[in-house]
Amino acid sequence: MENSYINGSDLLLNVGGKAVGHCSTHTLTFNSETKDRAVKPVATAPKSAGLWKSKGVTGLSISVSAEGLRFYGETENGFTEISALWGKGQSVEVEAYEREKDSAPYLKGKFVIASIEESSPAQDDVTYSVSLENDGEPDIYPGKESGGGSGSDDEDSGEDGGL
């Protein structure tokens, strides 16, 4: 498996402690808020130097979305379970991980359920979609410095600052 493409079915998403039930797809979006900075070029620079702006990152955020099929005998977190979590109006724990490596998520943290939607077309499968947005800095995300940790569940003192 080391020299092959990753199959989307091997990447799983947990919301509120359970996998998203009958999930057909999920998407992780890593966002950067940026600010343009335009400065006057030095007197010896060509006129075109003033046309270029630099950018700075002023904020980071992560959004997660998932879609699935409604299923009568759902044993994981499907529409009914996730909508109940939404109704509590609180953050939920989200984890994204590889099926065979579920003890080492590549994304983990508190997220707010921004929306949950059900679609019920006539003579077709009922589907649902859910959108989540990070609530503060996640515990694990790509690029976060772990402070030399092994990716285990060691308690984080918050002193490493993440970025």
Image: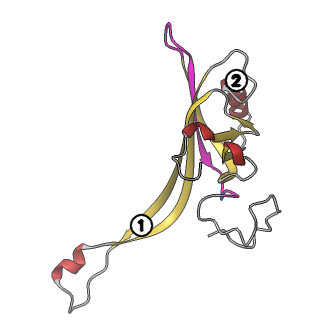
- Earlier-in-chain disc, 1 versus 2: 1
Q: Which residue is mark 1?
A: 35
Residue at image position (56%, 17%) is: 126
Q: Is residue 64 left or right of residue 91?
A: left
Magenta highlight on residue 122: yes
Residue at image position (70%, 58%) is: 139
Residue 56 in the image: x percent, y percent? 44, 70
- In this picture, which residue range is highlighted in magenta? 120-140
Magenta highlight on residue 126: yes
Res. 114 image quadrant? top right
Res. 36 image quadrant? bottom left
Residue type (three-letter) at the residue carrying disc 1? Lys
The image shows residue 79, relative to residue 94, as above or below, that is above
Q: How are the colours assigned in the image?
A: secondary structure
The image shows residue 143, relative to residue 45, as above or below, that is above
Magenta: predominant secondary structure element? loop
Residue type (three-letter) at the residue carrying disc 2? Thr
